Amino acid sequence: MTTVIPNAVVPSEFSRPANPADAELVYKVYCATPGYFQIISIPDPTLIEVQGELEAAFMDERRFTELLFAPVKGNWSDIIDPKTGKQVVGYLDYKLDYPYAGDGTVNLLLILESLQSKGFGRQFVTDLEDRLRGQVKRLLASIYGQNHRAERFWKTLGYSFAIDAKPILDWYAKVL
């Protein structure tokens, strides 16, 4: 019997799947983005919490986590992935068939603070949309807290308000 791997988990040239063994790399990304955790009013996660989150994602067959690499050459980051030798510039966590069958949901797109507003996020979302096109009907982005910058980001990519789950989050969606 042949196992079909969704395109979502087929790494692009800009990413590779992250698993629990990558907790330290993901933790470094989190440490390099303290502003995000301030916006959503939670303390920075600990290494053990990151490990637990990656383990939970690894056990969920619909959830995918990825380390993101610079789509262009340059000295962008001092976080180097020992498996690829590439500079890690972000982290992506998404789930398929959530909240409904045929949906994909970006739980977290995190770009190093020093690299935000340089087009990396746009490139990674475009790449993900391309990989998911034909697998999901719409892609949603969950925005935690009062993160107006994230709202603007997703709106510029063609996403529109879809689900109100206040006070914790809002969801924006785009039909693929």
Image: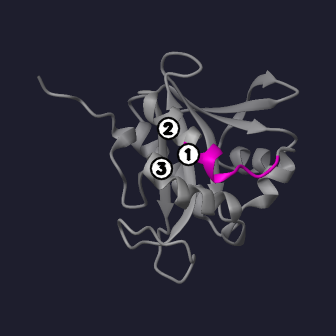
3D distance between C-alphas at marks 2 and 3: 13 Å
Residue at the location (71% across, 66% down)? 117
* x, y percent for residue 4: 23, 30
- Residue contact at pointers 2 and 1, CB within 8 angstroms: yes
Query: Which amino acid, mark 1?
Result: Gln
**Residue plotted at (59% across, 20% down):** 99
Q: CA distance from mark 2 to mark 1?
A: 6 Å
Q: Secondary structure at mark 1?
A: helix
Along the polypeptide, which appears first: circle 1 or circle 3? 1
- Residue at 52 percent of width and 42 percent of height: 54
Which residue appears at 52% of the width and 33% of the height? 56
Q: Which residue is mark 2?
A: 55
- The residue where tag 1 is placed is 51
Asked which secondary structure carries label 2, the reply is helix
Residue bearing mark 3: 66
Instruction: Magenta stretch: give its range.
Output: 43-51
Separation of marks 1 and 3 at Cα, in angstroms: 14 Å
Q: Earlier in the sequence, mark 2 or mark 3?
A: 2
Q: In the current view of this chain or complex, which residue is farthest to the top?
A: 101
Secondary structure under the numbered disc 3 in the rendered image: strand
